[in-house]
Image (cartoon, coloured by chain):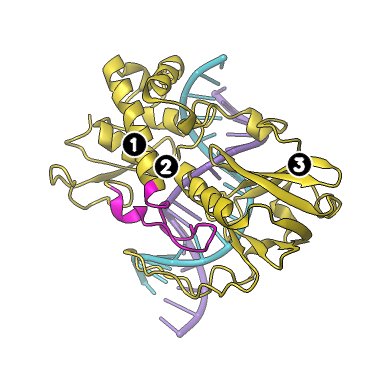
Chain colours: A yellow, B cyan, C purple
Amino acid sequence: MPELPEVETVRRGLERRALGEVVVGWGVRHSGVLEDCTAEDLSALGPSRLERFERLGKYLLIRMSCTSGERTLVVHLGMSGQFTFRASGEGLVEGFVRLASGYRKSLGPHAVDAHTHVVLDCASGGRFLYRDPRRFGRLLLVRGWGNSGHPRLDRLGPDALSLDAAGLSRIFALRSGARSVKALLLDQSVVAGVGNIYADEACFDAGIRPSVRSGRLSRIRRETLAACVLEALGRGIRNSGTTFRDFVGADGIEGANAEDLRVYGRAGLPCVRCGTELRASVVAARGTVHCPKCQD
DNA sequence: AGTACTACCTGGAGGC
DNA sequence: TGCCTCCAGGTAGTAC
């Protein structure tokens, strides 16, 4: 479930740890994760210096200088993707923090296992691992350093963090209609970066029921929702992302935001605001949790 | 055109 | 203990 805050956490970790690394070997173990490119295409890049780590919505954009020119490695983590970097000589991070859910990894995040699909070896001896148990994630290779050049990128609306609340509210006004507020938030062509967790959190913070028709929101409530979306995403980033199962940052460390969630994953538990039992439902074909008293 | 639904994929949880 | 079924969810493609 890597959404904007999780991808941003990975991006910051890579920027801190792996800027300037030169990839010299591409080990593709499961080519199914590659989209519109082949393992041969990657190998043909030659030594590739990683110049910048950027992000657009839930996509990680790795800007590379290759012998054949500038390329962007586009990474989508899908539901369970991990993109980690271990510097040469750096010790393995063994085991994970045990979560409230009780879940715990048996393998270190930097161990190559059956779910490790791509291994990038660097001239320094460092190594990137792309691991994704559920295989919803994808790697794309795009020419140049732009934010377009592939249908997946071209379809995206503005990145949520590129907007202020007023700008986001205006976009909501333009794109609202018969569909639910939750469907609006999840549509990456409206605003890129919001997924199921932060959509539910933002709706709770705004006091808006996720199933409400987006076109029925008043201007004031749209503005509140926009502010709450940005606040929920910001909180997620400050907490280094939400880990329910698989998410880890570039260093293999889990995020702490799961403990800060108000509604997601808390169906049946009391509302933090009023104590009413939180209700589970399906909205926009996604598991959804809301407070029947605080949200209307 | 806008909206809704489903396939993809796998591990984990729960039932028996 | 082990087998089975169901569930989770981001995106693209299809259907309405």
Q: Residues within 10 Å of mark 2 (few under 14, many from 20)?
A: some
| Residue bearing mark 1 | A231
Residue at the (76%, 41%) spot, across then down: A71
Q: Position of residue A36 (x, y in %)?
A: 77, 42
User: Residue A71's mark?
Assistant: 3
Q: Residues within 10 Å of mark 1 (few under 14, many from 20)?
A: some
**Would you say residue A250 sits in the magenta stretch?**
yes
Q: Position of residue A99 (x, y in %)?
A: 35, 65
> Are discs 3 and 2 less than 8 Å apart at CB?
no
Q: Earlier in the sequence, mark 1 or mark 2?
A: 2
**Image side of residue A68 versus residue A175, left or right:** right
- Measured along the vertical axis of the image, is residue A251 above or below residue B3? below
**Image side of residue A170 versus residue A7, left or right:** left
Q: Residue type at mark 2: give it.
A: Asn
Q: Earlier in the sequence, mark 3 or mark 2?
A: 3
Our reading of the magenta stretch's main secondary structure is loop
Residue stretch rendered in magenta on the structure: A238-261
Q: Residue type at mark 1: give it.
A: Glu
> Are discs 1 and 2 less than 8 Å apart at CB?
no
Residue at the (58%, 57%) spot, across then down: A17
Looking at the rendered structure, the secondary structure element under dot 1 is: helix
**Would you say residue A98 sits in the magenta stretch?**
no
Q: Residue type at mark 3: give it.
A: Arg
Looking at the rendered structure, the secondary structure element under dot 2 is: helix
Residue at the (27%, 30%) spot, across then down: A208
